[in-house]
Every structure is written in structure tokens, then in C-alpha cells.
Amino acid sequence: MPKKFVLCSLVFILSAVLLVAGCGGGNKTEQASSDPASSDKGGELSALFAKGSAVDELYYEFVIAEGEKEEARGKAWVKGTRMKNEMTVNDETIISIFDTAKAENLVYVEGMDMAMLSTFDPQALGAYDSPTNYSDDLDLSSMKIVGTETYDGHKCKVIAMTDEQGQEGAKMWVSEKFGIPLRIEDEIAGVTIEYKNLKVGSVPDDVFELPPGVKITDNR
């Protein structure tokens, strides 16, 4: 799995705005858990996140909220170095197709006949990153498993993340089977990210193709 994906960088938003101008959570079910709060002394966290890094193809839907306000909702397909994202912004469905191997992305609005091709920084991070990449920059020494819960039908390890003072600042629910976060709560920023309807497995190549008749404007 490539290191970084960005579904909605500033370049993505700007491209979508220029393109237009030129022309919804899983339920948590708490379970009794015998897991004590623990760090990664036994390598449990490392082994868990390694499962996610090994996932090469998947589909998921995401919801990003700040406080009680939903900021974004969409769905995404990932296959190797490619990712396709569909997201509704101001009643317009904006589609972006990324290729991290080429550092290029195509952006177009559903129903229009023009797409914009531009470059982007594959190393950039954001809340819209693929859930398989979320652990890339995490400090496992600041994390501990605090329980086990079922979330969106998946048995998950609940992991708390602390700051240098030992104060808990974020929490995530990570699928035990796939090693992928299904819910992330950043208590400091007040942001919640949910990954729903996760499907790990083969993604057809034609998912990343443009609709017939769509012309490409090269802005690289």
C-alpha cells in the first residue's frame, strides 16, 4: 500500500471550485472486555496496524464531522497506487481520481464533460487520507489499548492516544480483522472521522476510468 493518499487537499478543493465556475454513522456496541489498558509492550499494536498496511484494495464510505456539524460525506475505492473519491459539495458530486505513483489527480463534477488534470504532493496528510495509511505517522509509545467493542459490525480494539503530559487527546476503533480504523475521535480538534461499509477485496480497474465523452484539461 502506498504511503499517503489525499482525497481532499487544498488543490482538490480549488480544482473543484474552478471546474464548477468554468462551466452521511455506524453504531457502537460496547462489550464486556477483559483487556486492561496497555501499551505496545507485546507488539500487539504493531501487529494490528501491520494488517492494515497489507490491504491493497478496498472500498469504504466516510463521514467527517466537526462537533455536531457534518463537514463531508463520500465514498472511495483504493487499488494499489490509485484512489477514486466521490464527495458531495454544495449539492455537486465531485469525483477525484488520484495516482500516487505519478503524483497526479483528475477532478471532475458528475454530469459535466470536462476534467482537470493536476499534480499533488503524495506526502501531504489530511483527514481525508485512506484509513490504511492512518498509522504511518503514529507514535505507538503514546498509544494504549483500553478495551474491545463492536463497531459497524466489526470487532474492534479501542485505542487511546495521549500527549506528552499523558492526557488523552484522541481515540480510535480499529478492526481486529483488517487493522483499519473505523472511527477516529480527535477530542482536542473536535473532529470525528467514520469509515463505514468497509469492503476489503478486488476493485475493478474500470472504477478509475473517466466516463465516455469527458475531456481532460491539463493543468500540470
Image (tube, grey):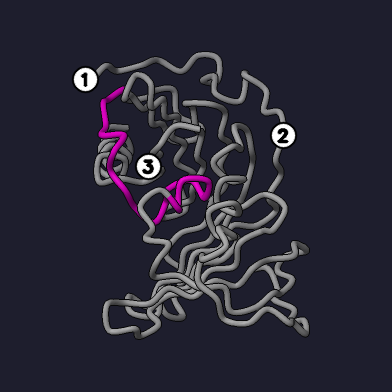
> Does the magenta portion include 127?
yes
Q: Is residue 45 above or below residue 198?
A: below
Q: Could you tell whether 201 is left or right of 136 in the image? A: right
Q: Secondary structure at mark 1?
A: loop
**On residue 220, which mark appears?**
1
Q: Could you tell whether 73 is left or right of 14 in the image? A: right
**On residue 201, which mark appears?**
2
Earlier-in-chain disc, 2 versus 1:
2
The span from disc 2 to disc 1 (Cα, nearest Å) is 32 Å
- Mark 2 vs mark 3, foreground winner is 2
Point out residue 44 in the picture as x, y percentages from the top left corner.
59, 60
Which amino acid, by three-letter code, is at mark 3?
Val
Q: Could you tell whether 49 is left or right of 126 in the image? A: right
Question: 10 Å neighbourhood of mark 1: few (<14), some, or many (≥20)?
Answer: few
- Mark 1 vs mark 3, foreground winner is 3
Q: Disc 3 marks which residue? A: 6
The part of the chain drawn in magenta is: 117-135
The span from disc 1 to disc 3 (Cα, nearest Å) is 17 Å
Question: 10 Å neighbourhood of mark 2: few (<14), some, or many (≥20)?
Answer: few
Q: Quadrant of residue 21?
A: top left
Q: Secondary structure at mark 3?
A: loop
Point out residue 148 in the picture as x, y percentages from the top left corner.
69, 74
Earlier-in-chain disc, 2 versus 3:
3
Q: Give the residue displayed 26% in from the left and 32% down from the top.
A: 120
Q: Secondary structure at mark 2?
A: loop
Q: Give the residue displayed 21% in from the left and 20% down from the top.
A: 220
